[in-house]
Amino acid sequence: MKKNSIELLKAEKEIINDFLSKFYNNIGYYPTVLTKYGHVTGDGSPKILKLSELEELFEPFLPVVYERKYRITAKFRLRELVDLRFIFYFIANKMLGYKLTEIGRYLKQDHTTVIHGIKEYNKLYETSPLFREKTLQLINLVKNKQNEPQALEEFDKT
């Protein structure tokens, strides 16, 4: 590598580390950041879950209808399952950094369905305490799997 590119790499790492420390000081945990070098957390190590591993974390929350347990990928419009899909879209995209097309491909859906699901997630998160509680439980499971601190406890009172 040339000297200039090494200096540029160091400058980019400084910017990322500065962002991570400010985020930690204000919010209380280190986020996972998607960079052109991969996913990086506050301790500098790359950490990411595969979508199949994320789906496994949703297993205890999946609804059972007529003694049949549905997967997150099922083409079924049961409200509980649809809500879980919205949470799956959000976590996969916003927390783990997967592209909309990657999420859609995994769930055998179009990327616009994922966009719609994330918009619906935002609406439900603001208006439904039960949805918010389920979201925080799943986020905590993801963080435990990635060895990150728990999500903020601000909504435990609701």
Image (cartoon, rainbow, N blue to C red):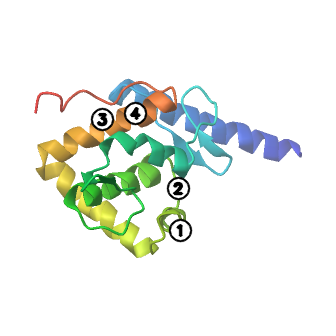
Between discs 4 and 2, the one toward the N terminus: 2
| Residue marked by disc 2 | 98
Task: Say above or below: 123 vs 130.
Answer: below
Q: In 3D space, how far apart are the residues under numbered discs 1 and 2 (Cα atoms)? A: 11 Å
Task: Left or right? Give the position of 63 relative to 55.
Answer: left
| Residue marked by disc 3 | 137
Q: Amino acid at mark 2?
A: Tyr
Between discs 3 and 1, the one toward the N terminus: 1
Between discs 3 and 2, the one toward the N terminus: 2
Q: Picture coordinates of residue 63 (x, y %)?
A: 27, 51
Q: In 3D space, how far apart are the residues under numbered discs 3 and 1 (Cα atoms)? A: 25 Å
Q: Few, some or many C-alpha atoms within 10 Å of disc 1 (few <14, some 14-19, many ≥20)?
A: few
| Residue marked by disc 1 | 105
Q: Nearer the viewer, residue 6 or 37?
A: 37
Q: Picture coordinates of residue 45 (x, y %)?
A: 64, 31
Residue at left 28%, top 43%?
Answer: 135
Q: Nearer the viewer, residue 1 or 113?
A: 113
Residue at left 52%, top 63%?
Answer: 106
Say which of marks 4 and 2 sits in front: 4
- Which labelled disc corresponds to residue 28? none
Badge 3 element:
helix
Q: In 3D space, how far apart are the residues under numbered discs 4 and 2 (Cα atoms)? A: 18 Å
Q: Are marks 4 and 3 in contact (CB under 8 Å)?
A: yes
| Residue marked by disc 4 | 141
Q: Are marks 4 and 1 in contact (CB under 8 Å)?
A: no
The quadrant of the rendering that contains the N terminus is top right
Residue at left 25%, top 41%?
Answer: 134
Q: Picture coordinates of residue 93 (x, y %)?
A: 45, 55
